[in-house]
Image: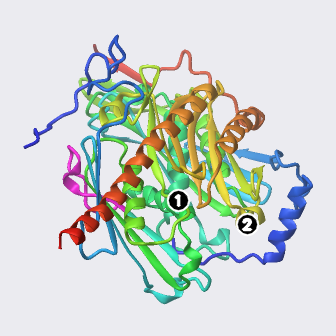
């Protein structure tokens, strides 16, 4: 049983003298990440991801026939993406209708995944990605992208690389990897980054808050380190799915 | 707003690409050259502040209105502001009527982030009765003609309109708020400037025209504040950027923002300004 969280209160210091954060992490430490592959039987590909208190479900349907048909492209598949938070995923109930934030995030997530997929292999079809945030604790768009990339791979969709994402925050003047909601709320800056790690290509980059040029470059380097770690977890999770099948086959 | 896609012949893409390889652009600009900016201030007398920005043939108009309202529960001692952007159907043959689509929402949210992160509006000054009554600043941006880079045109129109906006003073007496017929500037203390760049092939160009936008592989907007700090970043459309691209783009943005800021009106002098007159206390 997890403990009920009722409010987010700002501790006197977000980073203590020893460089520990409110949840005990070092500044360049990720939250604990758990990735499960193929958790939804109806979807062509799916992924459940936990990153700290974030709980994300991602599903992929397709390539499949597209309705309405006039949206179809003669030379490639289209990618559609919906990022949505369930009303009870946050402390103050969120209306179930899509907010402007969710519409923007759906767009940037789609644009973060698009470059990785060989859409030209599936003309006149659609690939639909659904990301549901079951619980949010900061960095959900990044967690959503990480999960969606795994779900796409699980669906067997040909990809140039996985896409892994992480945010870097600025808290009490220091750059921190993978900020949680508390740090996001009281921090000075937040910069989500997604990459195709093996190709060294950035597919999502956003930032708000104030950063000097120097801090911005450092934040980019820190994000890349985090992304490498997440990338390994994604690959591990995908490999584990097939190892499990192999074990099952060997037993029978 | 649902929109059919603009079509560009492949031959034009080839032409743009081969010119870029020689360091040239279709409209004769250098790769790092912005189009001429014209900013017309106060074009709408009935709005508290307004500005019409032209970037080449791209036209964006922003209007500011202030209203009394309730503060957000998490910031009881601050006023609020809301940015809304719409791409009007008269702005392009491909725009259709309807509520803002994801691209218009993106523009509104990126402009909003620039203003918010840079603390351009001193929201504390807009609080009248903590937790009860504050000024809410509504910023509405309309694109009137689309010839590329609606992001910067809208961002510049927004900050320009805010810089010249006037709002009424209020008097507070025993918890009662009266709006006075005395006008003061909006407490604007920073001038964030968005700089949008497009990656086409291996080249990065600043302030893409519509032709360039139609063939670009990736887009990035970096908003820079008065003291050269980055206050908003947004990678746009599909495609990808290398780390070196991003570093180049952010440096170029700092440089360009300095130039562009010269076209903006100065910060209002607000040192001795009183927004709220407290009476009988």
Q: Which residues are magenta?
A: A83-98
Position of residue B55 in the picture relative to residue A55 (left or right): right
- Does residue A250 sit above or below B38 in this rendering? below
Q: Which residue is mark 1?
A: A161
Q: Which mark is residue B215?
A: 2
CA distance for labels 1 and 2: 24 Å
Q: Position of residue B187 (x, y in %)?
A: 52, 28
Identify the image quadrant of the C terminus of chain B: top left
- Number of other residues with Cα within 10 Å of mark 1, as a class: few under 14, some 14 to 19, many 20 or more: some
Instruction: Inspect the magenta stretch and tell me whether residue A96 lies in it.
Output: yes
Query: Callout 2: helix, strand or loop?
Result: helix
User: Residue reaching furthest top?
Assistant: A17
User: Residue reaching furthest left?
Assistant: A1
Instruction: Inspect the magenta stretch and tell me whether residue A121 lies in it.
Output: no
Tell me the residue at 22%/27% (across/down): A9
Query: Callout 1: helix, strand or loop?
Result: loop
């Amino acid at each position: 049983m997890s403990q009920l969280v009722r409010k987010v209160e700002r501790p006197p210091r977000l980073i203590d003298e020893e460089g520990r954060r409110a949840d005990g992490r070092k500044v360049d430490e990720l939250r604990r990440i758990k990735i499960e592959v193929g958790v939804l039987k109806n979807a062509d590909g799916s992924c459940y991801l936990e990153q700290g208190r974030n709980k994300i479900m991602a599903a992929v349907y397709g390539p499949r026939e597209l309705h309405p048909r006039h949206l179809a492209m003669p030379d490639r598949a289209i990618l559609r993406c919906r990022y949505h938070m369930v009303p009870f995923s946050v402390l103050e109930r969120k209306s179930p209708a899509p907010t402007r934030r969710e519409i923007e995030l759906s767009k940037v997530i789609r644009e973060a995944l698009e470059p990785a997929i060989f859409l030209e292999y599936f003309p006149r079809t659609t690939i639909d990605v659904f990301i549901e945030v079951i619980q949010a604790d900061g960095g959900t768009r990044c967690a959503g992208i990480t999960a969606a990339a795994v779900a796409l791979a699980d669906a067997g969709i040909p990809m140039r690389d996985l896409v892994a994402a992480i945010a870097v925050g600025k808290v009490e003047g220091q750059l921190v990897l993978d900020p949680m909601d508390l740090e996001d709320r009281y921090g000075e800056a937040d910069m989500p980054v997604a990459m195709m790690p093996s190709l060294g290509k950035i597919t999502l980059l956003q930032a708000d808050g104030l950063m000097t040029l120097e801090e911005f470059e450092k934040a980019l380097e820190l994000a890349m380190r985090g992304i490498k770690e997440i990338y390994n977890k994604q690959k591990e999770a995908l490999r584990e799915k097939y190892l499990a099948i192999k074990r099952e086959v060997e037993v029978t | 707003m649902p929109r059919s896609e603009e079509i560009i012949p492949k031959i034009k893409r080839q032409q743009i690409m081969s010119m870029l390889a020689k360091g040239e652009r279709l409209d004769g600009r250098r790769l790092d050259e912005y189009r001429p900016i014209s900013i017309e201030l106060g074009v709408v007398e009935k709005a508290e502040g307004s500005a019409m920005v032209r970037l080449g043939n791209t036209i964006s108009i922003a209007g500011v209105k202030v209203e009394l309202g309730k503060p957000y529960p998490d910031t009881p001692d601050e006023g609020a502001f809301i940015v809304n952007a719409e791409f009007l159907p008269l702005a392009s043959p491909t725009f259709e009527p309807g509520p803002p689509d994801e691209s218009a929402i993106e523009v509104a949210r990126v402009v909003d982030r620039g203003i918010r992160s840079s603390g351009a509006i001193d929201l504390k000054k807009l609080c009248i009765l903590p937790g009860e009554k504050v000024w809410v600043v509504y910023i509405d941006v309309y694109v009137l003609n689309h010839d590329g880079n609606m992001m910067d045109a809208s961002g510049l129109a927004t900050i320009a309109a805010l810089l010249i906006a006037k709002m009424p003073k209020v008097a507070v007496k025993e918890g009662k708020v009266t709006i006075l017929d005395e006008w003061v500037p909006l407490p604007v203390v920073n001038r964030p400037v968005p700089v949008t760049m497009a990656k086409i092939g291996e080249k990065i160009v600043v302030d893409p025209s519509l032709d360039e936008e139609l063939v670009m592989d990736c887009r990035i907007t970096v908003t820079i504040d008065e003291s050269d700090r980055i206050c908003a970043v947004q990678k746009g459309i599909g495609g990808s950027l290398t780390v070196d691209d991003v570093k180049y783009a952010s440096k170029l943005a700092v440089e360009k923002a300095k130039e562009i800021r010269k076209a903006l009106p100065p910060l209002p002098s607000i040192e001795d300004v009183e927004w709220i007159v407290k009476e009988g206390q």
